[in-house]
Image: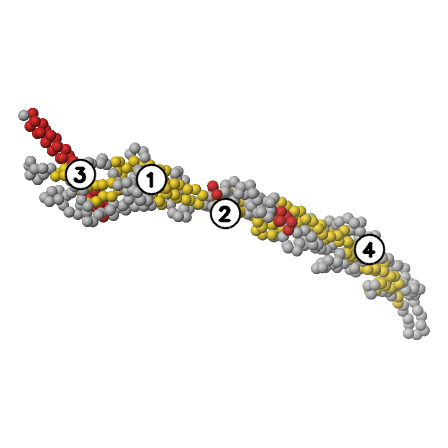
């Protein structure tokens, strides 16, 4: 008996062996007998050959063989098993996986393996694609959370020698572009994108960015690819891109203030407008100190003003319109200097200097006063004689060789006063003094303020002494006249 295994190049030839005895003389043969009584061919199980399937599992037993039996040749035919054949679209960088042969049943060469048996093959994972069975239904992943572990194959067809085509369908991928306000951390807009795996999107961010710039934003960073994005192959995770925008700002100062309600950018009349609080009135402030020189009866003879000006900048948020200010600064300083009080003949001021002060920002305008009080004018007097009973001496005006000029000063009537002092003394008498006032006929030459120097202080003291001397002389003369008149009256009575 011969068993031919086709395609596997394997044969098994069990033989039934017969024997008989013979004598050495005349040959007499005995009957044929099966050796060891084995007159049959045992049954033979077909072996499992990976990748092939047999047409029968067992070659049956043949019994009762004798010397007349012919050789028995039995054939077991093995045919190559089919495969699951992947079909993947041609995409640069994507490789098509190899075929997966149907698995053999480990115990039956005529069958394929049970799909639930250990080690059963899987359909390969191709990123960005989902395999489908012959009916167009997607096959299920072995692990839904991790498709890279492969997919459960569809059933082996009735004819296990035929192939099953597995078509890989491209996945639909998703992406989004977030536009973020850097100042508030809020999402201004989300652009949703979708496309096939490995395909390139035609979307660009240029139009959306231009829109926000026109609304007062400035671009900080565009995280979206300049030439457009390419969709990936991971269907479990959406691609995300971020465009960061910040609030624009514009800063103004008193020299270039804003005009509330008008466009910040003249070239963008529909864009952000200047908010309130950026005009010059909000960027510049001043405080005025007014010094009024007046007489005791309220007559104002002069006025001086000192001004301290403060400025600041304003920064406008071009998105919200919020205005923030810089600190106030005084370009020319915040201190006003001392003001010397000028003299005014015939008057005495209540102070010599109006002291300088620091003026903080926000100080209201204020006024300070300098008040002049009049000094009584003294008449001409006679000086008492040196000897009792002698004639009274009349004070004479002396034209001095050298005049001490008191600078022209303030007067309610714009008069120029001149004081002169005699350069020579009357014999054996007090100094002859004279004080004259002349109406000014020439143009007023201005006021020379008091400077507080020692020479002026001396001149002032000398003037006061002269006035005191005149006053004393008038008093004595009047007393003498009264006494003389009284004496004459008594003499006449006698």
Q: Could you say which disc has been placed on residue 160 in the image?
A: 4
Mark 1 nearby-residue class (10 Å; few <14, some 14–19, many ≥20): few
Quick check: 181 left or right of 407?
right
| Residue at which label 2 appears | 256
- Which secondary structure lies at badge 1? strand
Disc 1 designates what residue? 302
> Could you tell me how far apart the alpha carbons at marks 4 and 3 are, in whole angstroms?
151 Å
Please provide percent x and percent y for residue 294.
31, 37
In the image shown, does 332 or 171 lie closer to the viewer?
A: 332
User: What whole-number distance in Å separates the C-alpha atoms at marks 4 and 1?
Assistant: 124 Å
Look at discs 3 and 1 and give the one toward the viewer: 3
Mark whose residue sits in front, 4 or 1: 1
Which quadrant does the C terminus fall into? top left
Disc 2 from disc 1: Cα separation: 37 Å
> In percent of the image, x 11 and y 37: which residue is there?
392
Residue at image mark 3: 470
Q: x, y (%) of residue 82?
A: 80, 57
How busy is the neighbourhood of tag 4: few (under 14 within 10 Å), some, or many (20 plus)? many
Residue 59 sits above or below residue 287 on the image: below
Q: CA distance from mark 3 to mark 1?
A: 30 Å
């Amino acid at each position: 008996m011969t068993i031919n295994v086709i395609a596997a190049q394997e044969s098994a030839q069990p033989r039934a062996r017969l024997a008989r005895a013979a004598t050495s003389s005349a040959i007499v043969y005995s009957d044929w007998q099966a050796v060891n009584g084995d007159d049959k061919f045992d049954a033979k199980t077909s072996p499992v050959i990976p990748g092939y399937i047999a047409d029968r599992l067992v070659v049956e037993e043949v019994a009762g063989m004798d010397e007349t039996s012919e050789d028995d040749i039995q054939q077991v035919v093995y045919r190559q098993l089919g495969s699951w054949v992947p079909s993947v679209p041609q995409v640069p960088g994507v490789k098509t996986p190899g075929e997966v042969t149907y698995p053999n049943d480990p115990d039956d060469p005529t069958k394929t393996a049970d799909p639930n048996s250990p080690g059963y093959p899987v359909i390969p994972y191709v990123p960005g694609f989902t395999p489908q069975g012959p009916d167009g239904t997607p096959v299920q992943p072995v692990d839904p959370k991790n498709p890279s572990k492969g997919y459960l194959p569809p059933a082996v067809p009735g004819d296990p020698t035929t192939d099953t085509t597995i078509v890989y369908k491209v996945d639909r991928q998703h992406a989004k572009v977030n536009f973020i306000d850097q100042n508030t951390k809020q999402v201004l807009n989300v652009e949703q994108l979708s496309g096939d795996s490995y395909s390139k999107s035609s979307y660009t961010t240029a139009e959306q960015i231009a829109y926000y710039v026109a609304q007062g934003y400035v671009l900080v960073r565009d995280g979206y690819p300049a030439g457009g994005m390419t969709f990936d192959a991971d269907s479990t995770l959406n691609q995300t891109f971020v465009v960061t925008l910040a609030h624009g700002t514009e800063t103004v100062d008193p020299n270039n203030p804003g005009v509330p309600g008008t466009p910040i950018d003249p070239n963008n009349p529909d864009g952000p407008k200047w908010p309130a609080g950026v005009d010059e009135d909000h960027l510049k402030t001043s405080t005025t100190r007014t010094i009024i020189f007046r007489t005791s009866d309220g007559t104002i003879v002069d006025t001086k003003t000192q001004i301290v000006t403060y400025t600041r900048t304003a920064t406008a948020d071009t998105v919200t319109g919020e205005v923030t200010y810089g600190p106030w600064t005084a370009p020319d300083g915040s201190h006003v200097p001392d003001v010397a009080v000028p003299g005014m003949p015939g008057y005495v001021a209540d102070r010599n200097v109006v002291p300088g002060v620091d003026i903080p920002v926000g100080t209201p305008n204020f006024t300070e006063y300098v008040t002049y009080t009049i000094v009584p004018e003294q008449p001409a007097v006679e000086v008492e004689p040196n000897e009792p009973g002698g004639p009274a001496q009349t004070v004479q005006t002396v034209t001095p060789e050298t005049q001490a000029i008191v600078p022209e000063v303030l007067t309610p009537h714009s008069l120029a006063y001149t004081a002169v002092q005699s350069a020579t003394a009357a014999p054996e008498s007090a100094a002859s003094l004279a004080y004259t006032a002349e109406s000014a006929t020439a143009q007023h030459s201005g006021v020379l303020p008091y400077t507080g120097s020692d020479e002026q202080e001396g001149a002032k003291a000398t003037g006061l002494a002269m006035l005191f001397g005149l006053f004393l002389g008038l008093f004595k003369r009047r007393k003498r006249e009264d006494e003389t008149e009284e004496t004459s009256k008594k003499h006449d009575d006698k």
